[in-house]
Amino acid sequence: MTNRKSTPRPQYPHTGFAPTVLKAFMLLVVLSLWEPCGFPQNIAVFKGNNPMDGATWVRMEISAAEPYLASAGQTFTPRIGVECHQRGKNRSFSILLDSGLLEAVGADAAFVKLPYGERLLRTKIGNDKPRWRAWKELTNGETYEYTGEGETGFGGVYKPSRFLRDMFSAERVLVEFQPYRWNGGFTAEFKMRGLREEFEKHQECELH
């Protein structure tokens, strides 16, 4: 049997100094390469399926740059997202806004309430001018789905597919609304970087 001599580990003058410096250097290298690789750090992705019919879904969410103070005394961070569904060969998507509870319409409200649970919220995409767009309240009372209506809610249709294309090409999207028990409006800013790339990764997502 051959006796193998183990190579002694190098001794550093300050315990742990060299390994710590090396780790810090490697971390800086990884962080410097992170953005060029195109990994979207601001997008949260959730997936699920329905075992009953085999349908699948994926939701991509972008949190607002700043939270607001909700009526309960806690901060709430709005989110905007795209939810894609696939059942067999059929695919669809929805544009969703998690705003939290909103105030009822007042004289100075930052929105106009429409029939059937819809509200007009001032929405600004990229460098375009702010426009009133219709969002329909969902059952939880805190989430709204973009419905594609125009300035009045009845004309000038701005379809969800066009809205999403504009989101893809914009650096940011602004949505103004009035949180519950607020006296004025709050403008949520969403940075769109990486949304198109994330959307195109998933088989459930298709832009018609």
Image: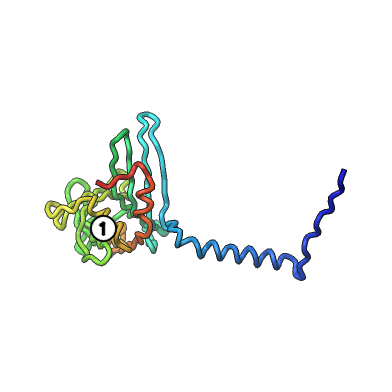
Label 1 element class? helix
Could you tell me residue 190's position as x and y percent? 34, 60
- Residue with the most extreme bottom position: 13
Could you tell me residue 88's position as x and y percent? 32, 33
From the image, tell me which residue sits under label 1: 166
- Residue with the most extreme top position: 52
Assign the N terminus to one quadrant of the image: top right
Could you tell me residue 69's position as x and y percent? 38, 61
Q: Residue at 30% of width from left, 64% of height from top?
A: 187
Colour mode of the rendering = rainbow
158 versus 66 height, above or below: above
The answer to whether residue 100 shows anywhere in this view is: no
- Residue with the most extreme left position: 155
Q: Quadrant of residue 79?
A: bottom left
Q: Residue at 26% of width from left, 58% of height from top?
A: 166
Task: Indicate left or right for 144 with 73 as reference.
Answer: left
The answer to whether residue 203 shows anywhere in this view is: yes
Give the tally of numbered discs.
1
Along the line of sight, which residue is nearer the eye, 68 or 156?
156
Q: Amino acid at mark 1?
A: Asp
Task: Indicate left or right for 193 with 23 as reference.
Answer: left
Along the line of sight, which residue is nearer the eye, 67 or 53?
53
Q: Are there few (<14), some (14-19), or many (20+) residues within 10 Å of tag 1? A: some
15 versus 140 height, above or below: below
Q: Residue at 38% of width from left, 47% of height from top?
A: 201
Could you tell me residue 53's position as x and y percent? 35, 30
Q: Residue at 14% of width from left, 56% of height from top?
A: 152
